[in-house]
Image (spheres, rainbow, N blue to C red):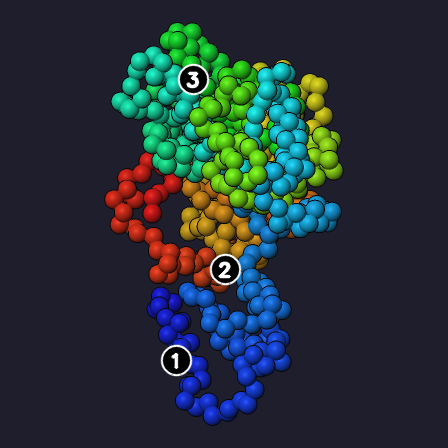
Amino acid sequence: MSLSRHLDTDTILSQAVDHPHRKHVHHSRSDRQLREIHDGAYSSRFATEQLPKFSIPPVGVSAHAAYQLVHDELDLDGTPSLNLASFVHTWMPEEGKKLIMENISKNFADQDEYPATMSVHTRCVSMLSTLWKAPEGGKAIGTATGGSSEAIMLGGLALKKRWQATRKAAGKSIHEPGPNIVFGANAQVALEKFARYFDVECRLVPVDESTNHVMSPERAMQYIDENTIGVMVILGSTYTGAFEDVEGMARLLDEYEAKTGQNVPIHVDAASGGFVAPFAYPKYKWAFDIPRVVSINTSGHKFGLVYAGLGWIIWRSEEMLPKELIFELHYLGSVEYSYTLNFSRSAAPIIGQFFNFLNLGFDGYRRIAQSDLRNARLLSRALERSGYFVCLSNIHKPLGTTKGITETLTDAIKGYDENDAEYYERGLPVVSFRFSDKFREEYPNVKQVWIQNLLRAKQWIVPNYALPPNEDSVDILRIVVRESMSADLVEKVVVDILQITESLMSGSTEGAMMATVTAPAVSKDNHSQLDDSHPDQQNTTTYAKTC
């Protein structure tokens, strides 16, 4: 039996429906009367016809029927709590949900109409500035965004404008050869988007096992020159969760400025780490207590514990945000100041963030961060002790393991409780793992991607993907341990991973076939096709290919 034959399901279904000329029943009631009587979800016309795909239907159904139809359609989605691929938070207390729904219709852009909401926004900016150790009296400034992607665009634009102003003041060209920005090849795609969208040369610093799969400050210095607008340092790699060395990068840039006179600032991409490091590693130096750090972004909807749709960016002082980027608006009833890429947006996520600050406090965020990391360590150890897997993430290893035994003994072991995250290597509660070398030698025919596919059949969403360029021959599986992932769920996913692995080890053809046929399909239609022949598709030096 062939499994490769393609069947056009739309054609088959269109041929299988009842023929219109065979319908002889005539109704005496009007269409409107029929819709009022048959307003049940499963007695509407969409019970026997496909839901519209490409055009708005000429006649609608009742709100109740529409809700039930869409609700049932979305049952095919994965379960958010079992989506271990995502950093995005999926749970809030009922009181938080209630506040969000009460304020879902408020437009954050309308500052004059919603002054109390603007006060909440200002308080959140102040709280984050204090959390990230902004200088006292320095007048830190910031804004909410749609997410860290928008925040990175804003931070990058501020770096570019400040570089341009410095070049112009020195009588130098801003076009030849033009600005560049430096960050690791492990960067999230938003950093590359900034460079591509705003005409900044993207200088990617190669990463590998010797650099703990993140950007090495020493290696980054090789890519810096007088046209570098800044270095983006990542506090929590999406690949392994490891923190890049902000303080080490700043020290080298200080030395560079002393030699050359070139001031190269740092923007910290703390999309995830901004709500982990201050609570789990309060002694760790990475934020505005380092003078060279001019701006920091984070995602409220990740470890800030708010639903999707919220990011933040803070500048250490007003001087770091060029005034030419700030818009003065007059047409909503008062004078308002704005620096965003978007305009209208719901204020609800901002209110959700303020709720979390009040509800959890510093101690609550710390307890959650410690719990997430504890469960991630449990998962890491269980996978490694099976002998089938090795972890590339380090948060289960005592502090100093990646630096040398001397530092381990002097810096890590004394003074810390083993239940305290500060005893271990710093990072996000992320577990990145792959088949061990021994397993690969003994079972060369077992494909690691099959683990992803068979876990998906059990409703777990665990991605398998390649490491960044320079080490992209290595695939990893990655699990993000969020607040909703309890120790009980950790146990369940470990059991499923090991059972799946052992079924593949036994040479089960059924397991291998299931792994193949459950591979997620990529849907392409006339409205969303990727052009694989694009000239840049094969030549890009990053993992983020053009369409």
Residue position marked by numbered label 3 in the rendering: 264
SS at circle 2: helix
- Separation (CA) of disc 3 from disc 2: 54 Å
Upstream in the sequence, badge 3 or badge 2? 3
Upstream in the sequence, badge 1 or badge 2? 1
**Percent from the top left, x then y, of residue 69?**
57, 68
From what the image shows, is residue 448 above or below residue 437? Answer: below
The amino acid pointed to by label 2 is Gly
**Local crowd at mark 2 within 10 Å, few (<14), some, or many (≥20)?**
some
**Percent from the top left, x then y, of residue 87?**
56, 42
Question: Viewer-nearest of labels 1 and 3?
Answer: 3
Position of the N terminus by quadrant: bottom left
Residue position marked by numbered label 1 in the rendering: 15
Question: Viewer-nearest of labels 1 and 2?
Answer: 1
| Disc number placed over residue 511 in the picture, else none | 2
Locate residue 443 relative to residue 302 in the image: left or right.
left
SS at circle 1: helix
Q: Residue at x 53, y 48 (%)?
A: 462
From what the image shows, is residue 39 above or below residue 284? Answer: below
Residue 45 in sight here: yes
SS at circle 3: loop
Q: Nearer the viewer, residue 106 or 316?
A: 106
- Separation (CA) of disc 1 from disc 3: 65 Å
Q: Nearer the viewer, residue 119 or 128?
A: 119
The amino acid pointed to by label 1 is Gln
Q: Residue at x 68, y 37 (%)?
A: 116
